[in-house]
Every structure is written in structure tokens, then in C-alpha cells.
Amino acid sequence: MAKVISAQQSAELIKDGATVAWTTAGLCSFCEEVASAVEARFLETGHPKNITLTHSCGCGDHKTRGMNHFGHEGLAKKSIAGHIGEAPALGKLVADNKVECHLLPQGVLTHLWRQMAGKKIGVITKVGLGTFADPRLEGGAVNSITDKNERVKLIDFEGEEYLYYRPFGIDVAVIRGSTADERGNMTMDREALFLEALSLATAVKNNGGIVIAQVEYLAKPGTLHPKQVKVPGVLVDYVVLSKPENHMQTKKTIYNPALSGDSKVPMGNIPPVPLDERKIIARRAAMELSPNSTLNLGIGMPDGVGSVAAEEGISEMLTMTTELGNFGGMPAGGLDFPATYNSECTIDHPYMFDFYDGGGLDACVLGLAQTDREGNLNVSKFGPKVVGPGGFINISSSAKKVIFVGTLTAGAEYEIKDGTIKITKEGDIKKFVNKVDQITFSGSYASKAGKKVVYVTERAVFELEDGELTLVEIAPGLELEKDVIAAMEFIPRISPDLKEMPKEIFEPDWGELKKIMESKIKNKDKRGN
């Protein structure tokens, strides 16, 4: 029992100025019990103070949980993360220049833990070139008190450009599992994801730090099946038993067996989503997919593509993945993201980014928040508000085909009937701008690589051609100048072969997607012959 301590005792292990790493994806695998105790100790005693927080994925519920526990001035000095958008309390301190902050590609951070575990030099990769992670732009630094040259360096290796992401010391790792025995051996069978628990624990332990594991249950030594133990006890210094409400499987679910692979739920009874601009965008984006392809769908509007695929009966033609480690099944939407229903396989977070970075994704569908005439995308910073890239940079730079989805403006209202769309009220924010606030996807680098990039909106479709955003389709019932160009800050290149978006996707019932996919199979067979 020597390793079993209370949450309050675990908080006392974190010293002033320490660097503390956390496993997390929203609230999946986040150690809420420990974080709450750290916050309570700081509010009572003023310690620990000036700590550095690091985590690869987003963390929080946009209210009080997750990294929001550290949104008190003086508690955190620095944040090194992939995303902080779910923690507005911490984000405000960053925006106000009270906390230094580097926001780096999620996959790079997961690989960095693994490199640090083996005391390797760090991560050398092309991921991030031309984006705000590139030190020629911002080096991942998101406010004026943060050194843009501290974490990332541009290097030349055998005549090619790479980014070198430097390792850094971590004093404490706080990881999460389901059951631990008294020796610290930890299972993760009830977790929705494995994340980087093993890599992070190894990195910290091998570099002289301590590892705290938050679990739900305690077992006697020797009673856990060795193949269910994801983190060996030799890597775990302390075990904290958690209350159920501080061990959420997702942001809203304490435990659902379908999200941990313990049961399968019927997916065919999902009611179709109503016909609106989001469904039109999802339908048109789905037309860009190919049968037997492996996909990543982003959160928000992109997950509508999965719903359309299910409604149109083509889900089995596709393998959907999440960057957190799940293959197959259906990514859960809303507050249950990034868990997956009926996953066929769950692997560690860093290994999924090996698959992604190596070109394993045939296509990805990602959100479109802001784009410009060069095809650059911004999803990471809006004015003074910073959220970070999450897995966006890794995914968009490595997928063979990139499909961005979003409305042309924010706040518009529509009338959809008789196979047409009408703008009844124009949006007050233009999303196609002269220059994006921050480059999260580089149109220039994508164009040089010959990557197929498509931008799908409710009223027009664009493609990246010769480094310039090019209008290739317009929705039926709309006027080019009045309804499209006037809603943009720049005039795009207009394709000489400008087409009309398919009228059928603006109807309540579509039913054409399976035919489109089967046609692609036939065409592929003909080319093969």
C-alpha cells in the first residue's frame, strides 16, 4: 500500500517551478481528482506556484474542469500544449501575457514524449513547416512574453528543410487508468483511449521525475492479467484513487461500455440529421471521398460527414479514425468526442501519429474557420484569443487529400427548398479573408507538394490550384457576384469550367452517395484493367 496516497498528498508532491505533464483529450484520461487537489492547495497556501503545464491535446470542458483548474494568476508560469481552447480560464491568462505559452502540433508532442523516454535528441520532422509553428513565423509562441525560438528550430538536413522540436525536462507526469495493483501496475480497460500514458510515464521516470497514476480501482499484486497492464508498476511511483465524478470517460459521460470497446451498439437506427446548411456541406464533402479509404474527421461540422455516410449506407466502405488512437466504428460527436462507438482497434496516441505522418490517411475532413486567397487555413487563433492547432497541423499536412468544410460567412440564415439555397440574412463575419490571423495550414506548402485540397461551403466549392484559391462550383439559385464574391474579402480565381453544385444535395432526400461510390469503384477497375 506504500504507493497509494490521497489526492491531497499527490498535490504536495508538485513543487514550485515544477514542470507537470498530463494525459488528456478533452476530459478523456484526464486526472481531475489530482488537478482539483492541486488547485485547492494553491488557493489555500499559494503553492505550488510558477509551474509549467504540458499536455498534447485539448483539456477541459470550457467551464471549470481540466486545465481550467490552473487558470489562477501565479499558479502557472508557462504552458506547452497542443490546444488550450477548452480551458478559457487559462487561455485568458495567456491572452493577457500572464502565462508564457507555446502551442505546438499535437502529434509532435506525443512523439516528443517517446523520444524523451529513450533520451533521444528530440523530434525532427516536416510537420509544421510554413505554419505558425515554423520559427520563421511564430515558432509556436502565441503571446509577446514567449520566445519564438525557444522550442522550435529550422534546420537543413541533406538539402531539405525540417523543423527540430527540442525536448525539455518534466518533473511530474500525471497519468490515468482504470485499475492499479498495489505495485502500481495499471490497466486502462474502462478508458475510452490509451493516449500517451506509457510514453509519458517512461519519459518522466527515465529522466528522474515522478509518475502519479489516478485510477478507479485498486487490486492485489499479481491479480491483473499481464496483457491488460498498459503501464508497468516500475514506472509508477504513486497511485491515487478517484471518485467517479472525477474520472469521466468523456466530457459528459462517466462510463459507457460502447466507448471503451466493452459492448457494441447498433448504429443503423441513428435518425438522419435535418436538412440545413451543415448537411449540405457534409453531403458535398462526402462526394469527395473514395471507397475503401481511411479517413480522419475533425470535430464539429466535419463529423456531419460520418452521419451522412451512415444515412446513405456507405459507412462500411470507409474506415474512420481519430488521431487519439481509434480505428473503425463511428467517432462520437459533441461532448463525447474524441471517444468512438464500436471501435475496431485502439492504439496508443503516438503510434496513430506515426500512421498519419507516414501518409496512412487517404483523406481528412477538417473545419474551416478562416482562409485566404493562397489557401491558408487558420483554426488556432482569432484576434487575441488563442486555442492552438491540436492535431490539425499533423493531419492536414500528411493526408493525401484534404477537405475543409465550413460556411462562407458566420451568422448567415438560409432558406433551402426545391433544390436551391437562398441567403435570407447575410452573416456578419467573413471567413474568406485577405490574410488569415494565423497559419495553421500552409496553402503554399500544400501546393508545392501537389496535394489535393478542396474547400466546401454551403454556397460554393473551391480548390487549391497553382497556389491560389479557385472557385469551381456554385450552389443552384445563387448569383456569383451578390451571394459569393460579395461575401468574401477578396475575389478568387474563377474556374473557366465553373459548375453548379449538384441540385440533389439540396433536397430533403438524397440517396445518391452509394451510387457515386460504386461508380468510383467501377472507374478504378476500368483504369486497373
Image (tube, rainbow, N blue to C red):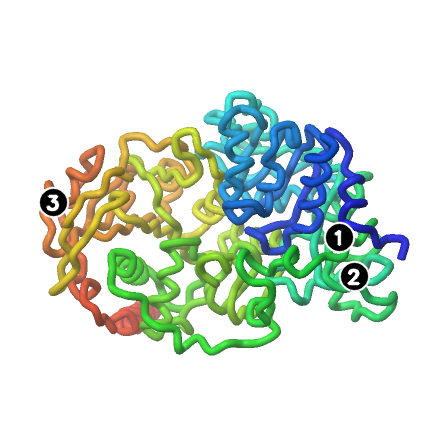
Q: Earlier in the sequence, mark 1 or mark 2?
A: 2
Q: Earlier in the sequence, mark 3 or mark 2?
A: 2
Given the image, on which type of amino acid does mark 3 rest?
Leu
Residue that badge 2 annotates: 180
For image coordinates 62% across by 30% down, the residue present is 78
Given the image, on which type of amino acid does mark 2 rest?
Ala
For image coordinates 39% across by 77% down, the residue present is 269
For image coordinates 48% across by 25% down, the residue present is 136
Q: Quadrant of residue 262?
A: bottom right
> Is there a contact, CB below 8 Å, between mark 1 and mark 2?
yes
In space, the residues marked 1 and 2 are separated at their CA atoms by 8 Å
Mark 2: which secondary structure?
strand
Relative image position of residue 51 (x, y in whole percent): 69, 32
Residue 47, relative to residue 465: is it above or below? Answer: above
Q: Residues within 10 Å of mark 3 (few under 14, many from 20)?
A: few
Residue that badge 3 annotates: 480
Circle 3 or circle 2, nearest the eye:
2
Question: What label sits on residue 134 in the rendered view?
Answer: none
Mark 3: which secondary structure?
helix
Q: Quadrant of residue 172?
A: top right
Relative image position of residue 100 (x, y in whole percent): 58, 27
Q: Quadrant of residue 119?
A: top right
Q: Residues within 10 Å of mark 1 (few under 14, many from 20)?
A: many
Residue that badge 1 annotates: 213
Residue 141, relative to residue 470: is it above or below? Answer: above
Name the foreground residue: 496 vs 203. 203
Residue 57 appears in the picture as rendered: no
From the viewer's perspective, tell me whether residue 106 is left or right of residue 194: left
User: What is the quadrant of the C terminus in the image?
Assistant: bottom left
Relative image position of residue 60 (x, y in whole percent): 55, 47
For image coordinates 50% across by 39% down, the residue present is 88
